[in-house]
Amino acid sequence: MKYYLATALLLSLLPITGCSAQQEKPAIATLDSEPLYTQHALRGKRGIMLSGSHPKWLLTSESNGLLLLDQQAQPISRFSGNVETLAVRDNVTINKQSSTLIATIDNEQNTIKLLSLTQDNTFTLQGSLPFEHSQLETLCLFRQPSGDISLFTADAVGQVHQFMIYDAKQQLIDIQPIRSFTGVPEVQSCAADDKREQLYLVEGNIGVWQYNANPESDPVRTLIAATHPHGNLQGEVTDVSVTPEGSVWITTPQNQQLHVVQPATGLSQAITLSDLTEPETLSVTWHNKQFQAVAFDAENDNYWQLNIKDIAPQKPLKQALITTITADAQTDPVARFGDAADDPAIWVDQQNPANSLILGTDKRAGLMVYALNGTLLQSLEIGRVNNVDIRQHSGINSPFNTLITASNRTNSSISVFALDTQRNVQHLGDIATELTDIYGLCMYQSDSGSYVFVNDKDGRYQQYRITATTPEIIAKKVREFALPSQPEGCSADDKTGLLYMGEEDAGIWQIDAEPTPTAQPQLISHVGEILKDDVEGMEVYHGENASYLVVSSQGNDSFVVYGLWDDYPILANFRIDMDLSSGIDGVSETDGLTVTAAALPGYPQGVMIVQDGRNRLPQQPQNFKIIDWRKVQALIEQSAHAN
């Protein structure tokens, strides 16, 4: 049978991008619908067409479990159970076999079952994930850019849980919790857009909510489709489906309609499903150059096959691919959830590198001291310490010739520390500043003395020379200058006598680090396609053959490496991704970072240490990640060879 679309609804749905006033009006689609499968007391819920040259269908049934239908819509395989929900991802290699990965909920056991379906139509149970505290309502799968697959679940009390379930590198099922957040009450359905990294949750009487599906994201949500009277969807929403190119399909069974929205083209239409009495779920795919769907009619307890014609798919999303590496170790998390950890520094034990220390600020508490393996050793709770830096120099009169300073926002001061003979960090006192809201800090060491740079959110920089720390701290302000707007991260190159500074919304500045009163800052790199605001932490790395400036590009959760020579070329741009085999998550929203070229146990070329704004796998308070510098150096060398 053939039906034409109902009036195109102007739904208040996804933000429309990439279309112009001259765009042609989309064609009105046509719909062919025909019965697919029914049987007595089927008690179905969800059906999906599986990709391939010969179509197959996967259906759920509370009485018969999972049913696999052949091209003639006849059952050819079955997995027993009481199931309603269903999510799949194809082309997944498990046990060296190309498979379809299936996730479903066993209603009687309240357990998620992970199955593989091989080309010979065999179901194999690959893993189970029981839930004890709340009834599971829905689930969906999300294939990440790395190829790893995560699972979203939503339960009866509105909690959403994300798990990693498939390790693409190891090609195996590996279930690990990532994060949990509050979703929507009375959730009906969920779907994930792999390409655009979006998660959609259906709140039946409200509409469809959109979240970022990336595990490193915050659970910020946007209502993209609302029911009457706040939007144009009539009746309750029961289902959402996303096709690979990003079209969003929304089901409202009370008026027998399927709504399609394409963010890139501006298309927003409603299809009336006249043959179905109560189309509760619709799973849409792209097959044979048209959209096809499997619908379940709850009133008649049967499945339908729909062919949706005259709607073209959206063009593929163009995404700039950023190289990824993984962290090798991580510190213990800070004590509390929230924006707490901020900036690291490293003290290198020249006699025994294994005893080196990582310093990390907790801007809600003080300065934390970690062993090289990340274990917390000390907690100096002296106030809202924001940035920390360290200098080791023969001219510093203290045990191990070490001076440590940190910006303390509790009283807008510079907190001063040193190591005692037992390698314990001691707070010596504070240097008062004239700043209103002290923020970033870095140190500089030269033949003329030991210096500390501190900045204020209003753009001001002050430079202090510290001439003594015992029996009392003696320091003097020797210079003041300003950037146009808010700075934070900075790094001084002791070899060249240059100071590099980040202006969060603008880019990277340079100025002489010696307190020359006539020196003026110069902007050397603007935010743009690669360096994204906010510009945050930065540090100079001195390699055997070259020196680099490593910068946190917080706006896109990446890091940029500049060559410290003419024109400051960009040598590498990378992200830090999760490593399921080690159980260390990726890095996002980095504030501060540090690097060292000193050889350390397991790190012959030194390390890069970064703050992680969202600590996952599982979800914990923030911490610091440790990366073998050889991974960064390899990216720099790859870039050099490519050019």
Image (cartoon, rainbow, N blue to C red):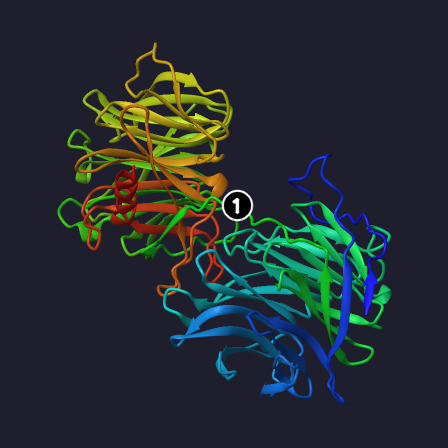
* Left or right of residue 397, residue 265 in this image: right
Q: Mark 1 points at which residue?
A: 318
Which residue is drawn at the image coordinates 28% and 23% (left, top)?
566
Q: Is residue 77 above or below residue 274?
A: below
Q: Quadrant of residue 474?
A: top left
Q: Position of residue 2 (x, y in %)?
A: 81, 66
* Residue at 50% across, 84% down: 122
User: Is 72 or 364 nearer to us in this picture?
Assistant: 72
Q: Tag 1's secondary structure?
A: loop
User: 595 or 53: which is nearer to us?
Assistant: 53
Q: Residue furthest top?
A: 518
Can see residue 174? no
Give x and y (percent) for residue 558: 42, 43
- State the image quarter where residue 535 is shown: top left
Residue 340 screen position, x and y as percent: 47, 46
Q: Nearer the viewer, residue 402 or 601?
A: 601
In the image, residue 308 sits, relative to residue 87, either above or below, namely: above
Q: Residue furthest left?
A: 351
Residue occupying the point 39% across, 77% down: 95
Q: Which amino acid does label 1 sit on?
A: Lys
For residue 178, side relative to residue 355 (left or right): right
Can I make out residue 354 in this image?
yes
Query: Where residue 611 appears, x then y in whole percent?
Result: 40, 46
Position of the N terminus by quadrant: bottom right
- CA neighbours of label 1 inside 10 A, class few (<14), some (14 to 19), many (20+): few
Identify the residue at image location x=83%, y=78%: 299
Residue 614, compared with residue 544, is above or below; it is: below
Q: Is residue 226 left or right of residue 453?
A: right
